[in-house]
Image (cartoon, rainbow, N blue to C red):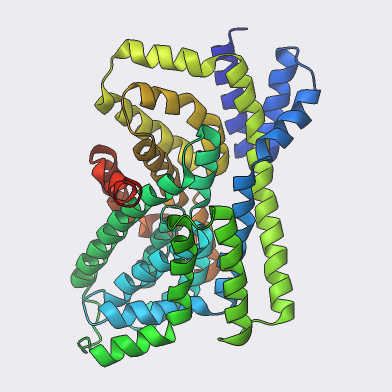
Amino acid sequence: MNPATLSLLLFILFIVLIIFGIPIGFSLGIIGIIGLIVMDQNFMMVAQTFLSGINHFAYLAIPFFVLLGIVMEKAKISGLLVDFADELVGYLAGGLAMGTTIASAIFAAISGSGPATVAAIGTVAIPEMVKKGYSKRFAVSVAASGGILGPIIPPSIPFIIYGVVVEESITKLFLGGMGAGLVLAFLMMVLSFTKAKIEKVPVSGRGPSLKGILRATWRAKVGLIAPAVVLGLIYGGVCTPTESGAIGSIYVILVGFFVTRTLTLKGLLDCMEKTARTSAMIMFVIGAAYLPAWLMASWNIPEVGTKFILELGHSKFIFLIFVNILFLIIGSLLDTPAAIVILAPILHPIAIKLGIDPTHFGTIVVVNFVIGYITPPFAYNLFVAKGITGMTMDELSLAVLPFLFVSLLGLVLITYIPEISLFFPRLFMG
């Protein structure tokens, strides 16, 4: 059978398995094994490919950043960030909503996870917004959409995976995500301001005061120091992302025990158990995804794809349109780590041949997939928001639509204005 045809059939089978509720990791393993059978390959490749796929030092950063986010939530540091952000912009129309986005951006600079950001910030911010006159739909849409900043603003788990898979600098990718995340956060805040004006959401009536801002900054200092420590060590060239994640984890654990005093030994053990479960799930999906990725590489699918696309023309504009449409669809159906492992090795070489900067392209890829976190049917952030609010998925999907459209606008800007994702890499790394 033609390898391209077989790849298409296996992808269709994968979608069918997902629809029937088979976990993503197992679905990837099933199609990989079927591919091995059809191509008469040695079954030892299953174990070898799985283990070699996850055997990267950079992947050790994943459990550390997962632990960081979980401990931040357990230690009640996320509430301090919401109060700090509310003090900055709470006097404006939609101020608390904008403050929630700011808090999400700060938390994102610690955790690297979308669902963790929604859980940590949303648990505090959604009830507070409803209490202050926001509709429940408005409140939950702000928190759920703010969660997509988690995997974009560094440190970012998807950027770590992308950097390992295509062998690009993870630090440069982190810096590229910084610009993209700030643009998306700004657009979300503009939408919150406009929406609050239209819905006539009450404002606090108090203007900003230097005393109030300083007081809120002092109270939130432990939360604000965390991203400065984690990112400062990386960008200063002192530590790798893995080492920085370990140091950051120790920092927030000490803060939880001795500063906020909301973390107990039992609570820490619970955090470690959650970290182990989450990290194991991520690593299993990554390892399983390497099998179909290896099969496609052995069938020369990347080379065939490169040749086919380049024969259609050498237009960056058209190629990026194709990439965005493809990744938006895949991102709403497939788990982000698996999608990166399978698709990045195919499309990354094409982007390089077309003269697209690898950091810029990596940022586009991750932003596309992360928008899938608020795109039905497999919208992870909406599932977390559902657990917080009890709203149905239909209600949540409708509520988040304005923020989904704004995120797509941000994606267009990030795609066609390379300086958004290249400004910080050039500033810090030349």
Q: Residue at x 33, y 34 (%)?
A: 357
Q: Is residue 279 left or right of residue 180?
A: right
Q: Is residue 206 left or right of residue 430?
A: left
Residue 257: % across, % down: 64, 83
Q: Residue at x 56, y 42 (%)?
A: 337
Tell me: residue 256, above or below residue 414.
below
Can residue 23 be seen? no
Q: Residue at x 73, y 72 (%)?
A: 269
Residue 79: % across, % down: 47, 80
Residue 381: % across, % down: 49, 57
Tell me: residue 200, above or below residue 398.
below
Residue 279: % across, % down: 66, 53
**Quadrant of the rendered structure where residue 289 is?**
top right
Query: Which residue in the rendered view is the most extreme toward the top?
Result: 1
Tell me: residue 58, above or below residue 345.
below
Q: Of 50 and 195, which appears nearest the observer?
A: 50
Number of marks drawn: 0
Query: Which residue in the rendered view is the most extreme toward the bottom?
Result: 211
Figure quadrant of the N terminus = top right
Q: Of 147 and 18, which appears nearest the observer?
A: 147
Q: Is residue 82 left or right of residue 120?
A: left
**Quadrant of the rendered structure where residue 48 is?**
top right
Tell me: residue 78, above or below residue 160.
below
**Quadrant of the rendered structure where residue 55 is?**
top right
Q: Residue at x 27, y 25 (%)?
A: 316
Can residue 285 be seen? yes
Figure quadrant of the C terminus = top left
